[in-house]
Amino acid sequence: MLPGRLMIRLLNRIALAGFTIAAASSCTSEPKVSAPEPACFSGETPPDLALMTSLPIYWPANFFFDGLDGEIAEPPWQRLIIEECHTLIPLDTLSKDSAGTDPLLGHERLAVIQPRGLSPADNVALDEWVRGGGQLLLVLDPMLVGEYDSPLGDPARPVEAALIPPVVARWGLQVSFDENQSPDLQTEIIGEGLVPLMQTGTISRVDPSDETCGVIANGAAASCQIGEGRVTLLADATVFEADVEARENGYHPLLNLLKYSF
């Protein structure tokens, strides 16, 4: 018998293979007409989206080894999809360096996807940036479902279980995880479309009477107005791990999430 974790991942691959069919048939049984590619910002230059992540979203998973044979590595599918509507700007940190350079200066949109861990200075900088008007998509997955070639201990390997930074509690939220939940693919509506979810965390308000944040998608996500800014918290990274062909209203599920967040 396969170990429990490997069995879950096998089931996940089977479920992800069926997401295209499920998403395509969720709204109507009538014949489909291919949707045009989205003109996200017609006539405009796509806005910048700063990105901090441990996932192979901007660079390929084996970026530092690809190209040694003279071939140029293809950009990850996530980057190609996101850059239909945004210009990605990769960041390594959120706080000022020793020279006083602020990596968040000039950015209005930021996606922090399964980060390697936020330092105390990063937490403070992120909170101040949001309260000053920044728009943040924060994705913290308690258990990734994707499979990665990098061995355990490799600095290039994505963080499999996200650490919940203290700033989340400062915004009035907490994230829990049920290890005994079903490993099956789930879909929830976030914004204008379906988002695939697997082995998701559950978001709740620390103070149930605090209406700063609204919990959505059966607890998988939350939307908060923090000062002058806005935070979208998602306790699942499946949409960044599993490529699907189905699009709703011309948008890939990943773009639907970004459209909702920004």
Image (tube, rainbow, N blue to C red):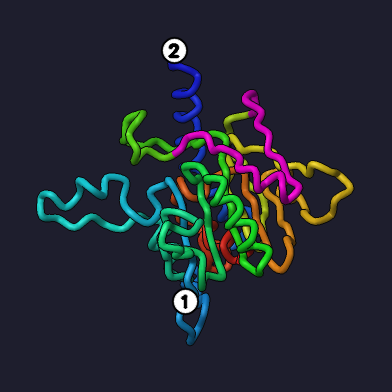
Q: Residue at x 48, y 50 (%)?
A: 240
Q: Position of residue 82 (x, y in %)?
A: 45, 63
Give the magenta-colored segment's residue range: 159-181
Q: How many marks?
A: 2
Compare residues 17 and 216 and report the one nearer the observer. 216
Residue at the limit of the structure toward the bottom, as seen here: 43
Disc 2 is placed on an element classified as loop
Compare residues 59 and 200 and report the one nearer the observer. 59
- Residue 92, by quadrant, is bottom left
- Residue 75, by quadrant, is bottom left
**Residue under label 2:** 1
Compare residues 37 and 161 and report the one nearer the observer. 161
Q: Is residue 131 visible?
A: yes
Crowding near pointer 2: few (<14 within 10 Å), some, many (20+)? Answer: few
**Residue under label 1:** 46
Q: Residue at x 62, y 25 (%)?
A: 179
Q: Position of residue 103 (x, y in %)?
A: 46, 63
Residue at the limit of the structure toward the front, as seen here: 99
Q: Is residue 28 visible?
A: no
Residue at the limit of the structure toward the right, as seen here: 209
Q: Residue at x 73, y 45 (%)?
A: 173
Q: Residue at x 68, y 49 (%)?
A: 221
Q: Quadrant of the N terminus?
A: top left
Q: Is residue 64 above or below residue 41?
A: above
Q: CA distance from mark 1 to mark 2?
A: 49 Å
Front: mark 1 or 2: 1
